[in-house]
Image (tube, helix red, strand yellow):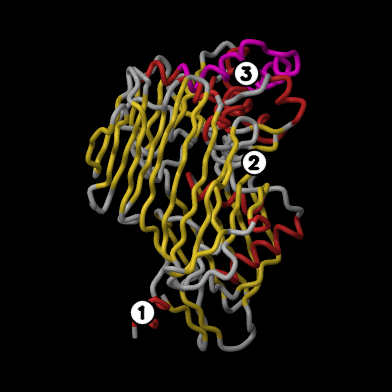
Amino acid sequence: MLGLALFLAPSRYISVEVDIDWEPGRKVTTVAYTALAGDDGRFMRVSRDFDPDYMEVELIRGEYGFPGSTREVPGWAVDSLTGSPGWPRALVAAFPGLRPGMTLNWTFRVTDTGPFASQGLFYTYIAGEEPDTIIVRCREHEGLSWHAAGFTEGSRGNDLVFTSAGEDFRELWLSTASSWAEVDSILMNSSREASAVVPPDLREASIEAGAAGALPRMRISRGRVLITESMQLQGFPGGDAGFQVRSIQEILDTRRATPMEAATLLTAMCRVMGMEASVVPSTDIRPPIPTPLGFHRAFVLVDGILEEPSEYLSPVGWVDTEDTLWLLLPGGSLAELPPETSQEICREDWTVSPDEGRFSLLVTASGGYDRELRRRLAGLDDEEMLLRVAEWLRASGVHFFPDTLIVSDFYDLTETASMEVSGFIAGFPGPWAERTPSLLWNRDGVVNRTCNGSVPAGRLIIR
């Protein structure tokens, strides 16, 4: 029975111990893990993301096995891989022959010489029930502050020691930043340096955007469209790399931009058009003390309106806030942006005519529904778009076959996204039954649906 219990038990972390050694310009973090393997294969391999431009990662210990019979991780099972989501590389260690019930011990050492490490000591650990024990040690530095929830604080010589207190939720924040103004300087320094020089290419694009209309909203929208349609927009790279902005000319030459770089481009364009604009970093985890960690989105604030230029094919002036966001405003103040739900509305107007064997559907969308509609269909030719709509109907359980389609200009972000589709009903002629049709959307919100049409004898619409 004991062997069966071990076999059925899920893998879990037992303990994590973190030692932080920081001096200006260099931070060495040693993280030792102890885990128990279950039957889910969770620890068949473990990894540590890193940016090779300013980080080095090495596996300094790797052992696993049953009590009294442990083995080391073989050298061939440790490798650096590219393509880790959001990061340039990842160090990966595999545990060949791992079996349920084995204990694993491995330790990564991370050497960080990036911009954040040169500015101060910053560290964050957030965990739920797992692991059982968390211990974080670091030297006490002048100006170091911390927020510890679910941890007890102690000392050992010159070291501060934070030990988890067995609660279901634990979070620890360490920072030497004295204020949010200092954090603003750390995060925005590279962007401000890059936007100080506006090359002729960007100036010409700004003039083109400014010709879109006299209203600031129209000019901002046009500038944003020029960026989203001429750039390969990338995900947030994470950490220091997310806030490092290349020169504007280099961004234009490579035709690719991170969220921070896209925001920097739009603010520079706005200034050429005579509008004051600022880049605003954002996070969905409220930092309890001033720290640059956690910020992962970049907005542009102009005329009191937020714009997110890295959000490809999103309606103009709309910010997706399914969760609360905290914005680091210019000058260094943290502001809360509550979830936005008033624009999460979609309308589906169906007309079903079984006597004619035809249907039609008019979709008008806003907010997240607008974005989903654009991203489903934009860039496809007429035939591909019609096939995509047919697949969407089929996935929604609607047995209609479209043959005509009219859509709005998905690349005009000032216009509400819409789609008008019509076609024939499956199985016509003959008895026909269908529940009130509806599209399957990939988000929660308000969808107002209507269904009209004549129903001849022998055919039925179930509402």
Tell whether position 203 is magenta: yes
Viewer-nearest residue: 409 or 1 = 1
Q: State the SS at label 2.
A: loop
The main secondary structure of the magenta stretch is: helix
Q: Tell me the distance, in whole angstroms, between the alpha carbons under discs 1 and 2.
A: 40 Å
User: What count of labels does the image hold?
Assistant: 3
Magenta span of residues: 185-213
Q: Quadrant of residue 272?
A: top right
Instruction: Please report whichever mark, 1 or 3, sits nearer to the chain's N-terminal start.
Output: 1
Of circles 1 and 3, the one toward us is 1
- What residue would you read off at disc 3? 269
Q: Residue at x 25, y 41 (%)?
A: 149
The residue tagged 1 is 5
Q: Left or right: where does residue 307 sit relative to residue 231?
A: left
Q: Amino acid at mark 3?
A: Met
Instruction: Mark 1 or mark 2: name the one nearer the start of the chain.
Output: 1
In what quadrant of the picture does the N terminus appear? bottom left
* Tag 1: amino acid: Ala
Which mark sits nearer the N-terminus, 3 or 2? Answer: 2
The location of residue 99, given as percent across then percent down, is 50, 72
**Mark 1 surroundings within 10 Å by alpha-carbon count, few (fewer than 14), some (14 through 19), many (20 or more):** few
